[in-house]
Amino acid sequence: MSQTITAWSNSRADTYLLCPFRAKLKFKDKRPELPRELPTGKKEHANDRGSRIHDAAERMVTHSAPMVRELHHFETELVRAQDIYVGDSNSIETEKTWFFDADWLPIDGKEYDKIWLRVVIDLNVRLSPTEVLIIDHKSGKRYNNEVKHSEQMLLYVLSTFMKYPEVELVTAELWYLDLNELVSITMTRHQALQLFRKFNNLGVRITSDTTYIAKPSLHSCRFCPYRSGANKWVVGTGECKRNPADKTEQPDARWHTLRNEGLLKLKELQEKRRVEKSKSQNKQRR
């Protein structure tokens, strides 16, 4: 088994930046996630719903399938894509995965040992020999995801230029299907190549890490799929437990001590301010 995560993608980068240890368990060790309970009042999980909507959008464009209700905000755009596909199926692609090696050269997905980066494109429209439109469907919320989604757009724009050397202009759009919102960015090749060092360094960092130091926080640990049951290596307090079968070095316990001391001091300071405020209010009443 490789000592590192051998390939990265936008979603893998999100997980790694949230917590390298979690990324290790999921992508390197291939640890299974425990079955999840459906959220109250929901008939399907958010990721399952997203996959279903993506499949429906693809069928609508390539097979003229009926539109599902979740797509109605973008009916006009999808019908236009459908018309383009009927007129020239070579000018539009749906749900395609692009593969790149460590030199950012496009390769075939069958060259598994060479795959370094995967990019999944929901809709790829060739507007002209030198211009491309890339579209990503978003079935979830936008709020608090703006930065993450912007980074995804930039990575997709850069990847498009790396895949198509003849292209000089790329537009990337995010379609927020539930919100009826569209976010767009257009870049030239020169502009996009300014991003190369940033994303190359990120990819190198993910695929060369051998320590996978955890980044515990109350938020990330709360939703971690490895925090309970047979996979209880992470507890809700944010302190990662060591898997007995795992020889990887775990985070220094001193970090957790300092963190807990900091939280304690914060609580003491808040209580002190509360008492002072209460005394001040009592004096004013007198």
Image (spheres, grey):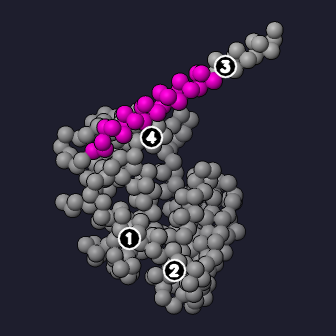
User: With respect to residue 225, does 117 lie above or below?
Assistant: below
Of the residues under marks 1 and 2, which one precedes in the sequence?
A: 1
Instruction: Categorize mark 4 by other alpha carbons within 10 Å: few (<14), some (14-19), many (20+).
Output: some
Q: Is residue 203 left or right of residue 47?
A: left
Residue 87 visible to an observer of this rendering: no
Amino acid carrying label 1: it is Leu
Looking at marks 3 and 1 on the same chain, the residue that comes earlier in the sequence is marked by: 1
- At a point 63% along the width and 63% down the height, the residue shown is 175
Residue matched to label 2: 193
In terms of sequence position, does the residue under pointer 2 or pointer 3 come before the other?
2
Q: Which mark is residue 117?
A: 1
Pinpoint residue 249: horizontal percent, then vertical percent: 24, 47
Q: Point out the frontmost of discs 4 and 3.
A: 3
Comparing 62 with 241, the one in front is 241
Left/right of residue 173 with respect to residue 247 in the rendered view: right
Q: Nearer the viewer, mark 1 or mark 4?
A: 4
CA gap between label 3 and label 1 equals 56 Å
SS type, badge 4: loop
Find disc 3 in the rendering and name its residue.
276
In three-dimensional space, the C-alpha distance between marks 1 and 2, rounded to whole angstroms, equals: 17 Å
Give the amino acid at mark 4.
Answer: Ser
State the image quarter where residue 242 is shown: top left
Label 2 to label 3: alpha-carbon separation: 56 Å
Which amino acid lies under the numbered mark 3 shown in the image of this protein? Glu
Direction top: furthest residue: 286
Q: The C terminus lies in which quarter of the figure?
A: top right
Q: Residue 115 at x, y = what percent?
A: 32, 72
- The magenta stretch is 250-273
Identify the secondary structure beneath mark 2. helix
Sequence order check, earlier mark of 1 and 4: 1
- Residue at 45% x, 63% y: name it: 10
Give the percent coordinates (x, y) of residue 18.
44, 51
